Image: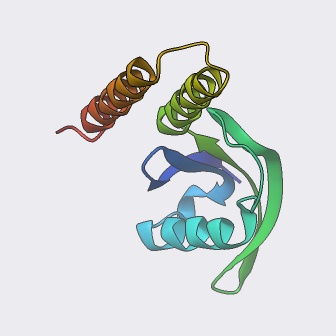
């Protein structure tokens, strides 16, 4: 049975990789059904998402018509999640330094505003704006 790997975008910065559906049944509707089923039951509810595989490689059974297929899948987080983590950590660090009196409050606020604007610019580039 010739199986191929399907990469399905399920949101900005997040995709699911599915392996185990034979080419003969891999219609757009089946791909969508598989992706929705895996999203519904597979994305970890808690935890830290960084770029790369979320929650490792998992297995699921999907029924298409009267046939059952064992799928191997994983979720991949893209750069938007990594950028959010990095900018959040930077903001937290600035706020901590400010609370300890190690940096000027006005400069801390200006730096956080700068970081927000930079992240917004990055997001606009990813969205093609």
* Front-lying residue, 8 or 78: 78
- How are the colours assigned in the image? rainbow
Task: Tell me where residue 75 appears, x and y as whole percent.
Answer: 65, 48
Residue at (63% x, 28% y) in the render: 99
The correct choice, above or below, for 33 with respect to 73 in the image is below
Residue at (46% x, 67% y) in the render: 27
Task: Tell me where residue 102 appears, x and y as whole percent.
Answer: 61, 13
The correct choice, above or below, for 76 with respect to 117 in the image is below
* Front-lying residue, 92 or 8: 92
The correct choice, above or below, for 111 with respect to 21 in the image is above
Which quarter of the rendered picture does the C terminus lie within? top left
Q: Furthest residue to the front?
A: 101
Which quarter of the rendered picture does the N terminus lie within? bottom right
Q: Furthest residue to the top?
A: 102
Tell how many labels.
0
* Front-lying residue, 41 or 66: 41
In the rendered image, which quarter is residue 33 located in? Answer: bottom right
* Front-lying residue, 35 or 65: 35
Task: Tell me where residue 77 appears, x and y as whole percent.
Answer: 59, 41
Q: Furthest residue to the left?
A: 129
In the rendered image, which quarter is residue 90 located in? Answer: top right
Q: Is residue 24 left or right of residue 41?
A: left
Task: Tell me where residue 110 appears, x and y as whole percent.
Answer: 34, 24
Q: Furthest residue to the bottom?
A: 66
């Amino acid at each position: 049975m010739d199986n191929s790997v399907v990469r399905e975008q399920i949101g900005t910065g997040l995709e699911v990789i599915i392996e185990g559906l034979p080419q003969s049944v891999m219609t757009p509707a089946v791909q969508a059904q598989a992706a929705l089923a895996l999203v519904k039951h597979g994305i970890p509810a808690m935890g830290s998402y960084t770029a790369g595989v979320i929650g490792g490689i998992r297995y699921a059974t999907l029924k298409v018509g009267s046939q059952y297929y064992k799928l191997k899948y994983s979720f991949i987080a893209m750069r938007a999640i990594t950028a959010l983590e990095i900018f959040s950590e930077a903001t937290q660090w600035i706020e901590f330094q400010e609370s300890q009196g190690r940096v000027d409050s006005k400069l801390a606020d200006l730096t956080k505003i700068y970081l927000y604007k930079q992240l917004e610019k990055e997001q606009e580039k990813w969205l093609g704006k």
